[in-house]
Image (cartoon, helix red, strand yellow):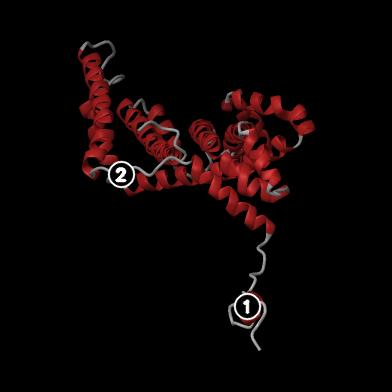
């Protein structure tokens, strides 16, 4: 008997095919799904990947301005020395200072002092980042807390670090804790303010999109707010390092921990001996370390800005 409705018959036959009922995947976690959607939106904001030029050309382009600046500084220094504005034992010639610096670099005790100073710097800065991040996230999240201590954070940031040393010595005596206390209290406000500023300037549109996607609580901060505030946060980290490095150098000159020989202690010893050559050599060491760390932060900030499309082509 012919089938009256061939299309219906075809539908029934198709119902018994193996692919008739596809397997339905288990739905993803809402937070993860929202994060995936935000990642897709982020890709629209990010700058395009640029073709990398030759490595040597790029290195030279970033190096020659620094070499020129160094040459200018040394040239001016040499001219001042030749003018005899100050006696040679007070302001020595550049060649004498660099000769002293070369001999220092061959001493094991010198590198022990550098290691101690950098250990203090890294430890203090890490503590400052941890404390500043927690405070910044809390202040940006709770309005009453911002009204209570928002201005206090800025006040602490602008306060000279050397003002904390009398209190630090009273609290911790002449110990490592006194130096770390001043380093942390000098750097943490900058880190906190950097995070607060970054969170404040997250586009309102992004927040509304995150709300529509169901982002709440920690998921909202983890997948939306913190990544969006990263450029300002990196700038806060850079500024925090500058404060911590200056505080550390002041601390090593003022708080001499018995039994330790750091860069600051060696510089203070050279000053007590009226050894201007050694003093200037240690100043150069401190300057070079600061520049190297600053270049690290500049590289991280530059890559981040390129990735976010915040730099010109």
2 or 1: tag closer to the N-terminus: 1
- Name the residue carrying label 2: 51
Residue sitting nearer the eye, 180 or 240 = 240
**Where 276 sits versus 252, above or below?**
above
Instruction: Compare residues 63 and 278 and report the one nearer the observer.
Output: 63
Q: Quadrant of residue 148?
A: top right
Say which mark, if any, is on residue 105. none
Q: Nearer the viewer, residue 165 or 34?
A: 34
Percent x, y of residue 135: 68, 39
When the figure is inspected, residue 3 is found, relative to residue 180, above or below; the finding is below
In the displayed orientation, state which residue is furthest to the bottom.
Answer: 1
- Report whether residue 169 is seen: no
Q: Secondary structure at mark 2?
A: loop
Given the current orientation, which residue lies at the most extreme front position? 1
| Residue 309, quarter of the rendered image | top left
Q: Position of residue 218 (x, y in %)?
A: 70, 50
Q: Give how far across and how far down residue 281 sits, in percent.
A: 32, 32
Above or below residue 110? Residue 271 is above
Task: Tell me what residue is drawn at x 66 percent, y 31 percent.
Answer: 167
Q: Which residue is mark 1?
A: 6
């Amino acid at each position: 008997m012919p089938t009256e409705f061939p299309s219906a018959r075809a539908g029934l036959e198709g119902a018994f095919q193996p692919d008739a009922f596809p397997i339905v995947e288990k739905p993803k976690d809402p937070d993860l799904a929202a994060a995936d959607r935000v990642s897709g939106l982020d890709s629209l904001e990010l700058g395009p990947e640029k073709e990398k030029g030759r490595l040597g050309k790029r290195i030279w382009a970033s190096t020659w301005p620094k070499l020129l600046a160094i040459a200018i500084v040394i040239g001016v220094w040499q001219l001042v020395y030749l003018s005899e504005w100050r006696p040679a034992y007070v302001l020595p010639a550049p060649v004498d200072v660099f000769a002293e610096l070369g001999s220092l670099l061959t001493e094991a005790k010198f590198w022990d002092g550098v290691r101690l100073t950098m250990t203090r710097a890294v430890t203090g800065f890490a503590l400052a980042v941890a404390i500043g991040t927690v405070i910044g996230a809390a202040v940006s999240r709770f309005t009453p807390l911002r009204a209570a201590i928002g201005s206090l954070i800025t006040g602490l940031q602008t306060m000279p670090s050397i003002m904390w040393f009398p209190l630090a010595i009273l609290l911790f005596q002449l110990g490592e804790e006194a130096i770390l206390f001043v380093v942390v209290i000098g750097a943490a406000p900058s880190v906190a303010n950097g995070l607060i500023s970054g969170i404040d300037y997250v586009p309102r549109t992004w927040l509304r999109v995150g709300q529509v996607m169901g982002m709440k609580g920690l998921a909202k901060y983890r997948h939306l707010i913190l990544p969006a505030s990263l450029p300002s946060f990196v700038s806060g980290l850079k500024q925090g390092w500058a404060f911590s490095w200056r505080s550390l150098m002041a601390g090593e000159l003022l708080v001499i921990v018995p039994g330790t020989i750091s860069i600051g202690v060696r510089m203070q010893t050279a000053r007590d001996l009226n050894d201007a050559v050694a003093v200037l050599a240690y100043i150069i060491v401190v300057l070079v370390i600061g520049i190297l760390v600053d270049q690290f932060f500049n590289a991280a900030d530059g890559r981040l800005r390129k990735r976010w499309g915040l730099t010109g082509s």
